[in-house]
Amino acid sequence: MFEKLLIANRGEIACRVIRSARKMGIATVAVFSEADRDALHVSMADEAVFIGPAPSSQSYLLIDRITEACKTTGAQAVHPGYGFLSENPLFAAALEAQGVIFVGPPSNAIEIMGDKIASKRLADSSGVPTIPGINTVIKDAEEAVGYAEQIGYPVMLKASAGGGGKGMRIAHNADECREGFTRAASEAQSSFGDDRIFIEKFISEPRHIELQVLADQFGNTIHLNERECSIQRRHQKVLEEAPSLFVDEALRQAMGEQAVALARAVSYVSAGTVEFIVDAERNFYFLEMNTRLQVEHPVTEKITGVDLVEWMLRIAAGEKLSLKQQDVQINGWSMESRIYAEDPLRGFLPSSGRVKRFRPPEASEEVRVDTGLFEGAEVSLHYDPMVAKLVTFGRDRDSAADVMSLALDRFEIDGIESNISFLASLVANKRFREGSITTAFIDEEYPDGFSGVSESDDAQNRSLAVLAVIHEIWTRLESSVEISERSIRYLRLKNKQLRIEVEERSGHWSVTLDGAVVTVSIKSTPFKRRVDFDVDDVEGSLQLLKTGAAYQVFHAGSQMRVVILEPSSAGLFSLMPEKAQPDRSHLVLSPMPGLLVSLNVDAGSDIKAGDEIAIIEAMKMENIIRAQRDGKIASIEASVGEALEVDQCIARLEKVVAD
């Protein structure tokens, strides 16, 4: 076994690799960019090497910076994590030439399987079913349209290199195909340095099922069962689980045999993932092979008890795989929610900035959190928006989902926006709970985007009862005025006002909300933001944040603003005037922090609603800013190459004068 390992990555995956290496007694070396000087993976590692400016193209993607770091530190092996250089055959070859062990497959396997076109050809030759399409590089947008009409819409335009949902677009007509080609190629070039695009038929009602494989240097190859990764947004996985409710034993065996056969065909070594698209009739088609560790690997670890990172390190060091196929079992159920720094209420736009509060739920046998964040850390716009992975485990699917719902309620993040409310909505969704999911699930269930969660009446009443008790406890401790045993107040939320009575009993509280009586027990310290409770034998958690005279209540993905009023002021509150909002309809504002990479209008330009005005790049994704109404550009307020802040003005339209 080697003695020193360099991790050529950042964030949660770098921290994850360090933990397994430390458990095995291996010293670790972190690399970091200017933006990551104070990052968690840097402080966790035994050594750290600075490799360049914040943009990944000037740091984490530079092979010579990593190989030089190996020389200066004496690192004998490199784990690439995922993303960045993890599927770059030139990187693996450079390390091999330097005598440094690459913790992954040989460079020729990466080259073949990391290229979607080459891997599809290999799958075809190996008898593995593949998606119909044109398995060649497309030269330009017009050629893409020609092929699309030959295949038949809808089609999928896909980057040949990389993964993670980058460089992928669905097109339903010629116009979408032209724009999709341009955007996919641009994203692929930005993310992977490779703008090659190919095209294939888009499979309707598909499920995304993948098989984890593990292979050593002695020809031993096994699979570790499947993961269901169908819950996706913009081809980016959001919530994964293992096993899949859809996969029966016959399908599991057939897909497993094909995955192992494909790995053997390319002489694969290390951990890898063979991904399939499965239709409603359980026909499966090869999608791609990821020649690296997957983001969602923890769910496989939870149901099999296998530490995949540890086995990657052991195999790289020349150890023989001691696991046999019959040793791999399915014990329980696991789910993973990807916590992204994005605002689901604003179209999932990226969010960056200083993390003011970061309190994940406590780790246990049922809950695991992989992250590279901590309170005070900076989330940079230069990198992927995923900041943590919340993994839960249960004896069955319902149990794992119940644990996930509670853990999401207990996850505290401030300073940046996160998608936690959206994840809570997904886990609570009836169709998700039934397992009736495809890769179109989010588009179908949220056709107009995500506008927040409305609690059921029962859940809302539980939240309000708990809030009333906490407010009563705080009031009693802060007030010098004698308070009666029964307190009467009014709760105002939106345009509704509710009468509430709170009375302390031995060991619990009795709460009367508009005539309905519930029993409340507080299970946590009342002065913390997170409140664990029991309301009529229903256990749960919520978060309270006091802002002036109001409370923000976060529970089950919902957010309520509640004002608690004394009886003397309740009648007067409705007379308070509401502040008028300023008219900003003539302003084109940046909806996120990011880099202005393109500006397609000038002062004096006439525009129509839907016209492309600008493109902003943030967290490795390009976001098109379109006109919201017809008009004429009065002035340009930002320049290409400028780093924009949220709501920064890009352009002004001439104001519409009322008749």
Image (cartoon, helix red, strand yellow):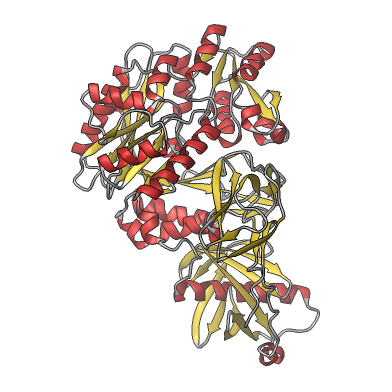
Is 24 left or right of 27, judged from the image as shown?
left
Near-viewer residue (553 or 211): 211
Tell me if residue 237 can be seen: no
Q: Position of residue 478 (x, y in %)?
A: 77, 74
Q: Quadrant of residue 28?
A: top right
Q: Position of residue 32 (x, y in %)?
A: 67, 28
Near-viewer residue (282 or 471): 282
In the picture shown, does residue 490 fall above or below 597? Answer: below
Which residue is at 70% across, 36% downward? 35
Residue lying farthest to the right in this orientation: 480
Q: Position of residue 324 (x, y in %)?
A: 30, 22
Is 572 left or right of 125, judged from the image as shown?
right
In the picture shown, does residue 395 fall above or below 444? Answer: above
Tell me if residue 530 can be seen: yes
Q: Position of residue 1 (x, y in %)?
A: 52, 12
Which residue is at 48% across, 61% downward? 450
In the picture shown, does residue 380 fall above or below 507? Answer: above
Q: Quadrant of residue 157?
A: top left
Near-viewer residue (148 or 392): 148
Quadrant that contains the C terminus: bottom right
Q: Quadrant of residue 481?
A: bottom right
